[in-house]
Amino acid sequence: MTIANGRGRLIYGCMGLGGPWDGSSYGAAEIDQAAAVIDAARGIGIELFDHADIYRSGKSEAVFGEVLARSQGLRAKIQLQTKCGIRLGERGLDTHYDLSKEAILERVNGSLKRLQTDYVDLLLLHRPDPLADPREVADAVGQLVAEGKVRQLGVSNMSGTQIAFLQDELAMPVVANQLEMSLLHRDWLESTVLVNHAEGLGYSFPQGTLEHCMAKGIELQAYGSLAQGRYTGAKSGDLSPAESATASLLEQLAGEKDTTPEAILLGWLMKHPARISPVVGTTNPARIQACADAASVAGTMSRAEWYGLWVAARGSNIP
């Protein structure tokens, strides 16, 4: 049973909360912002909130925890997930990965303290660590589960093969895999149809990952699902011809379906039979609200509309 059961499929990504990505402290403004986006997300049916220990140097979790502390009963009404496994600016390195037992236990306990909660519903291993021993990972996760600090386990940025390798050592199933997936970043999609095509060599997404997750009931969580606002006017800057054409088509479809371009964009992802769960990361409550119709759009979008958006985003026909 995956964490998707019993809740809506949209997820709120908390990376933007907490102020700058530095060691500065947060204040009332950052806490109030977190409260506003939590209210907006819950207002459109979002129940799962996505964190990571590194987001805003831990401040994303901390401001969220402040909201939980002042909002009696809120923790019981939502689900929380966080990630561990990336170290930033430590040990003389800008970035490295650490899924040792010691690191997993340390980072999860730190997240729980910042979030001001006794447990997370889902822990994601943030990146593959080439030095990780799957047995050591399983030992750490088993201890956290036994202590009641983690209820389910997932991964992020892993291939189907890597998940299967890890699963052999785990006493509990991997229930989620978070990957960059959107109409703008389409490696996850194009790699599935470019088998035996020379063009397929240019895509890095490992073949079989979608199929593995679908076969095993592993929820696919899509970060970057709103394409950083490139198609919906939320991000300024010059658009490529394909981006402009895609933005125009989204506007057209939104008008025809009496909804928003954001809902069309997310609905396109959710139409895929892998039952993708988009992670919405905007801190603008109005943009969060604009995503409200995504599930209903997914249910009504025709095959021709779905393929039409794909062709527009490619800027060329599908081979």
Image (cartoon, helix red, strand yellow):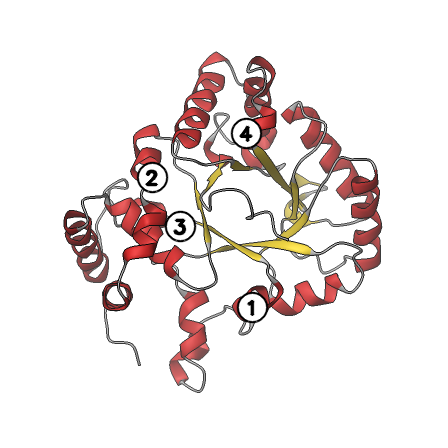
Q: Which residue is mark 2?
A: 292
Badge 4: residue crowd in 10 Å (few <14, some 14–19, many ≥20): many
* Residue occupying the point 72% across, 37% down: 107
Q: Are marks 3 and 1 in contact (CB under 8 Å)?
A: no
Q: Give the secondary structure at mark 4.
A: helix
Distance Cα–Cα, label 1 vs label 2: 28 Å
Q: Which residue is mark 1?
A: 209
Distance Cα–Cα, label 4 vs label 1: 30 Å
Q: Which residue is mark 4?
A: 60
Total marks shown come to 4
Please, what is the three-letter code of the amino acid marked with disc 2? Ala
Q: Nearer the viewer, mark 3 or mark 4?
A: 3
4 or 1: tag closer to the N-terminus: 4
Image coords of residue 146 (percent x, y): 83, 40
Front residue (pair 226, 167): 167
Please, what is the three-letter code of the amino acid marked with disc 3? Ser
Badge 3: residue crowd in 10 Å (few <14, some 14–19, many ≥20): many
Q: Nearer the viewer, mark 2 or mark 4?
A: 2
Please identify the quarter of the rendering in which residue 234 is found. Answer: top left
* Residue occupying the point 29% across, 45% down: 262
Please, what is the three-letter code of the amino acid marked with disc 1? Thr
The circle drawn on residue 225 is 3
Residue 115 visible in the current orientation? yes
Distance Cα–Cα, label 3 vs label 4: 20 Å
Q: Nearer the viewer, mark 4 or mark 1?
A: 1
3 or 4: tag closer to the N-terminus: 4
Badge 1: residue crowd in 10 Å (few <14, some 14–19, many ≥20): many
3 or 2: tag closer to the N-terminus: 3
3 or 1: tag closer to the N-terminus: 1
Front residue (pair 312, 266): 266
